[in-house]
């Protein structure tokens, strides 16, 4: 099963959808790893890569349906509508899309794994990794070399061990640390038998990709580091940040130049190659070897989750280097997934508002600002009043941002709109 996959936003034929819910920990709990993505040279070397992590070989899909609105909610142009599904509330009419799987050309042709006919091969520099007799010495074997070519037991089929202290080979003064952050990685994806990795109870808000990853990188709450959402408007710049536009690459949003920009921004590298790069860097001498590896996969949240192949590639690679009892691995998610339904959508058009005068950041939380920032008619207090207790079964509570619960730390930034809609679980807001 290849991890070189791209899937567009898609609908769930049985009307079951998933939405974001927070899953990562508080700033206090992650201060120990702050600066992973932006460490200076005299602290440690930093690896930023992309990977897909999962338990053994499993697969899960997450499907979403969208309603056009502000912030780039329109479905991708290449997504095809196969049939119109009409919910009883009309909330998903014409908005459900068929799952479409696209494999980039040459995805598996780069020699990323050993096969029987490659065992003991002559070295071929066009391959991403090697199965030659000297690959162990040179540190560039494919991660399945020992299991396939030497009959070693795959890591996942080995006995579970309780490791109380690091067991590192010669040349490793301290255990390396690999942090894997996986977009939309729900806690239940780590289930094994009847157990599940415990949730962390103090959560970062909002449960969105960029705010949470930048919190990990900086040790700051979103209101302090300024990345308050995947979509946000800055009144000083008079510009809108969105994951779907190149504006996200502009350093002015980040308070500096992001590590993703120089010098090879825009290159598309197979996920397997990133894992191989980590394994090769672990083979470097101690004075050249990075200590901290920060690895992120942004793909799963886009097309759902396809879990498994890289967990084996990474762990088998560590095992054949005798590092599986040495390296510390931390797995985090920027948010989880919550069950939702096409009918569980609140529409602002159902409330006493002039929706033509406002801009809404829609989704599992809502933020409202005036369409015309200079409009004298716009009053956020009036907007909150017009949205408060207007329906017998209302599934959100409006707040002025300064009145949001203090534990959310989501008020003291100019990019946070004056009006915030705190949604019930499993509900969305739209225009």
Image (spheres, rainbow, N blue to C red):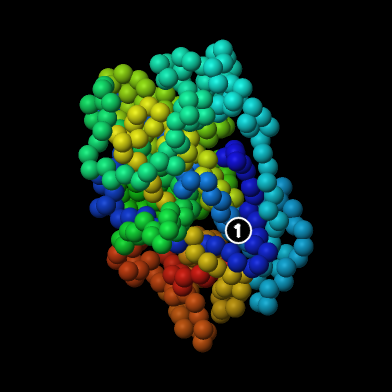
Closer to the camera, 20 or 125? 125
Name which residue lies at 57% across and 44% down: 245
According to the picture, the residue beneath numbered tag 1 turns out to be 63
- Disc 1 is placed on an element classified as loop
Picture coordinates of residue 373 (x, y %)? 50, 60
Q: In the displayed structure, does residue 378 sit left or right of residue 257?
A: right
Taking the view exactly as shown, the residue that stands out farthest to the top is 122
How many numbered marks does the figure carry?
1
Which quarter of the figure is the N terminus placed in?
A: top right
Taking the view exactly as shown, the residue that stands out farthest to the front is 151
Name which residue lies at 42% across and 24% down: 280
Name which residue lies at 61% across and 74% down: 343
Can the viewer see residue 164?
Answer: yes
Q: In the displayed structure, does residue 288 sit left or right of residue 88?
A: left
Eyeballing the image, is 10 above or below 245?
Answer: below
Closer to the camera, 276 or 357? 276
Can the viewer see residue 74?
Answer: no
Closer to the camera, 135 or 425? 135
Eyeballing the image, is 81 above or below 116?
Answer: below
């Amino acid at each position: 099963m290849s991890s070189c996959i791209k899937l567009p936003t898609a609908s769930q034929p049985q009307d079951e959808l998933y939405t974001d819910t927070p899953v990562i920990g508080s700033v206090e709990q992650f201060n120990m790893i702050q600066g992973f993505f932006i460490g200076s040279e005299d602290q440690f070397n930093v690896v930023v890569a992309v990977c897909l992590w999962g338990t053994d070989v499993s697969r899960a899909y997450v499907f979403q349906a969208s309603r056009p609105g502000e912030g780039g909610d329109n479905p991708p142009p290449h997504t095809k509508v196969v049939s119109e599904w009409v919910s009883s509330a009309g909330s998903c009419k014409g908005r459900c899309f068929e799952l479409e799987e696209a494999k980039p050309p040459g995805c598996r042709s780069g020699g990323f794994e050993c096969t029987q006919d490659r065992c003991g091969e002559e070295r071929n520099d066009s391959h991403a990794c090697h199965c030659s007799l000297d690959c162990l010495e040179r540190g560039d074997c494919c991660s399945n070399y020992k299991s396939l070519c030497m009959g070693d037991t795959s890591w996942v089929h080995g006995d579970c061990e309780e490791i109380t202290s690091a067991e590192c080979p010669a040349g490793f003064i301290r255990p390396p640390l690999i942090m894997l952050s996986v977009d939309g990685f729900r806690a239940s994806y780590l289930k094994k038998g009847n157990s599940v990795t415990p949730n962390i109870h103090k959560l970062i808000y909002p449960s969105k990709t960029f705010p949470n990853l930048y919190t990990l990188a900086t040790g700051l709450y979103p209101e302090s580091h300024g990345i308050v959402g995947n979509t946000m408007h800055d009144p000083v710049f008079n510009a809108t940040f969105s994951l779907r536009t190149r504006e996200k690459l502009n350093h002015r949003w980040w308070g500096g130049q992001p590590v993703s920009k120089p010098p090879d921004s825009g290159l598309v590298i197979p996920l397997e190659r990133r894992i191989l790069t980590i394994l090769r860097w672990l083979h470097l001498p101690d004075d050249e070897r990075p200590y901290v590896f920060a690895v992120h996969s942004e793909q799963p949240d886009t097309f759902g989750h396809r879990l498994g192949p890289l967990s084996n590639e990474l762990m088998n690679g560590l095992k054949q280097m005798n590092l599986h009892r040495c390296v510390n691995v931390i797995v985090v998610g920027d948010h989880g997934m919550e069950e939702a339904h096409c009918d569980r959508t609140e529409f602002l058009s159902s409330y006493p508002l002039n929706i033509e005068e406002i801009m809404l950041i829609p989704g599992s939380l809502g933020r409202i600002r005036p369409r015309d920032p200079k409009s004298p008619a716009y009053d956020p207090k009036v907007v909150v009043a017009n949205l408060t207790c207007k329906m017998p079964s209302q599934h959100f509570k409006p707040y002025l941002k300064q009145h949001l619960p203090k534990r959310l730390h989501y008020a003291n930034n100019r990019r946070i709109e004056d009006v915030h809609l705190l949604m019930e679980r499993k509900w969305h807001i739209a225009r």
